[in-house]
């Protein structure tokens, strides 16, 4: 259950993640199923448990959710070096795994986005550019609200999940209507959850 | 439109601003970006935020990463984009790796899972409220508010209720809306030409 840390394998990992980067419309998390197939089933570089705990841990931590990719790279490297007992070599390979996977998932999409948006900025008076921004505005606003809906709807047992729904509704009202700091809300949500109240 | 906007003072300002907002982003950074950059720091208007978010969403790659690149790049070019991107990723990366080393599988324990459930419910509220707050910006949309609301409802139904794939909805509803906006903007141009 580990990768031979050869150049060919690192290049293969880099190439695979780099191609996923360009397919990740709607966020990096949309590529997670393919990463699972590639890392766990095809190559057996990661265990199933490591894969899911990487996702869970990145959700518990602050920051963009693309960081789950860093954790996947970390675990691939750590396994290749013989696990946490592998000493300095294992930690070095783990860091190399972070570097390879993050650069691969970010570089292609970032270059494309940066180039495209520079172009659009220079041509912001073009009718096509203005039409894109005008036309997309209602769509992306609806997508935000739909995301909130889907996050809530993944808990779909009314008898059990109503406190969660109530928490979401109260949060929505507070963020919409007040200037309360968002960290208080997140902290309260975590606390209510840990105490088993929601 | 120019309602007293500020701008980042330097690349360092960009870096630390994005670091701070990324570290607040539990369960999604977008709501924090809107709160900090539009409401508190006033680097951009609601309308500009929606326009940028539309682009960040449609381009491949993590969308808040795209957003940080775009905002940083606007003020300081490529170095600004790199500074904002580094701010968005560096500190959270250190945090998540430390968590991985120190706690390993603690995220799988029952208490952590319950805390995550609670935080997830709050995150759902944050993102919903962000969407609701941005609806007001549609008043200035050239397509008119009624059509905007209709398009938004259509998108919501397709994604949230019918669970259609995002790409189809973006291409179908989004593409149609852009074509319509293209026509409307032509009409606006002619109108202005007539007036002068």
Image: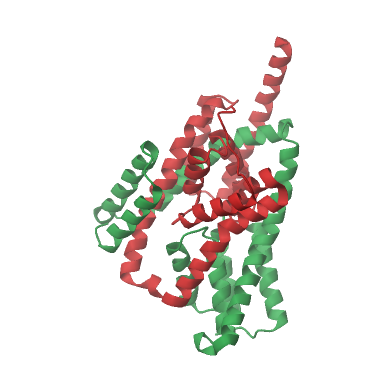
Chain colours: A green, B red
Residue at (75% x, 38% y) in the render: A122
Instruction: Identify which residue, B143 or B131, lies in the foreground.
Output: B131
Instruction: Identify which residue, B83 or B45, lies in the foreground.
Output: B83
Q: Is residue A151 above or below residue A179?
A: below
Q: Is residue A185 above or below residue A140?
A: below
The picture quadrant where one finds residue A186 is bottom left
Residue at (58% x, 73% y) in the render: A73
Residue A196 visible: yes
The picture quadrant where one finds residue A118 is top right
Across and down, in percent, residue B185 comes to 67, 25
Across and down, in percent, residue A181 comes to 39, 47
Residue at (27% x, 51% y) in the render: A162
Of the 4 image quadrants, the one containing the C terminus of chain A is: bottom left
Q: Is residue B72 above or below residue B45?
A: below
Across and down, in percent, residue A54 comes to 49, 70
As drawn, is B164 to the left or to the right of A181? right
As drawn, is B96 to the left or to the right of A121? left
Q: How many marks?
A: 0
Q: In this view, does B9 lie above or below B83?
A: above
Residue A2 visible: no
Instruction: Identify which residue, A70 or B7, lies in the foreground.
Output: B7
Across and down, in percent, residue A182 comes to 40, 48
Residue at (53% x, 71% y) in the render: A71
Of the 4 image quadrants, the one containing the N terminus of chain A is: bottom right
């Amino acid at each position: 259950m580990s990768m031979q840390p050869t150049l060919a394998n690192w290049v293969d990992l880099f190439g695979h993640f780099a191609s996923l980067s360009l397919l990740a419309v709607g966020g990096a998390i949309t590529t997670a199923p393919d990463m699972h197939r590639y890392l766990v089933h095809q190559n057996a570089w990661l265990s199933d448990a490591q894969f899911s705990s990487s996702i869970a841990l990145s959700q518990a931590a602050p920051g963009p959710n693309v960081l789950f990719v860093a954790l996947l790279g970390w675990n691939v490297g750590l396994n290749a070096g013989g696990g946490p007992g592998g000493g300095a070599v294992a930690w070095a390979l783990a860091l190399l795994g972070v570097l390879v996977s993050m650069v691969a998932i970010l570089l292609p999409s970032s270059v494309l986005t940066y180039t495209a948006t520079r172009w659009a900025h220079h041509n912001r008076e073009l009718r096509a550019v203005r039409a894109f921004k005008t036309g997309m505005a209602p769509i992306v606003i609806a997508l935000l609200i739909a995301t909130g809906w889907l996050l809530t709807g993944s808990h779909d047992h009314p008898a059990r999940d109503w406190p969660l729904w109530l928490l979401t509704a109260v949060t929505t009202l507070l963020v919409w209507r007040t200037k309360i700091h968002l960290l208080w809300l997140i902290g309260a949500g975590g606390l209510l959850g840990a105490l088993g109240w929601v | 439109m120019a309602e007293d906007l500020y701008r980042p003072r330097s690349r360092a300002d960009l870096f630390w601003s994005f670091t701070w907002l990324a570290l607040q982003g539990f369960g999604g950074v977008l709501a924090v970006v809107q709160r900090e950059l539009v409401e508190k720091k006033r680097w951009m208007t609601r309308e500009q935020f929606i326009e940028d978010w539309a682009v960040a969403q449609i381009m491949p790659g993590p969308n808040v990463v795209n957003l940080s690149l775009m905002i940083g790049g606007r003020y300081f070019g490529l170095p600004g984009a790199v500074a904002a991107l580094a701010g968005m990723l560096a500190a959270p990366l250190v945090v998540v790796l430390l968590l991985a080393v120190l706690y390993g599988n603690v995220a799988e324990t029952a208490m952590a899972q319950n805390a995550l459930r609670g935080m997830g419910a709050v995150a759902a509220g944050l993102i919903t409220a962000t969407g609701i707050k941005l609806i007001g910006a549609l008043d200035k949309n050239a397509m008119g508010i009624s059509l905007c609301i209709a398009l938004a409802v259509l998108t919501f139904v397709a994604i949230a209720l019918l669970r259609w794939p995002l790409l189809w909805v973006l291409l179908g509803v989004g593409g149609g809306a852009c074509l319509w906006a293209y026509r409307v903007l032509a009409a606006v141009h002619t109108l202005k030409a007539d007036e002068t």
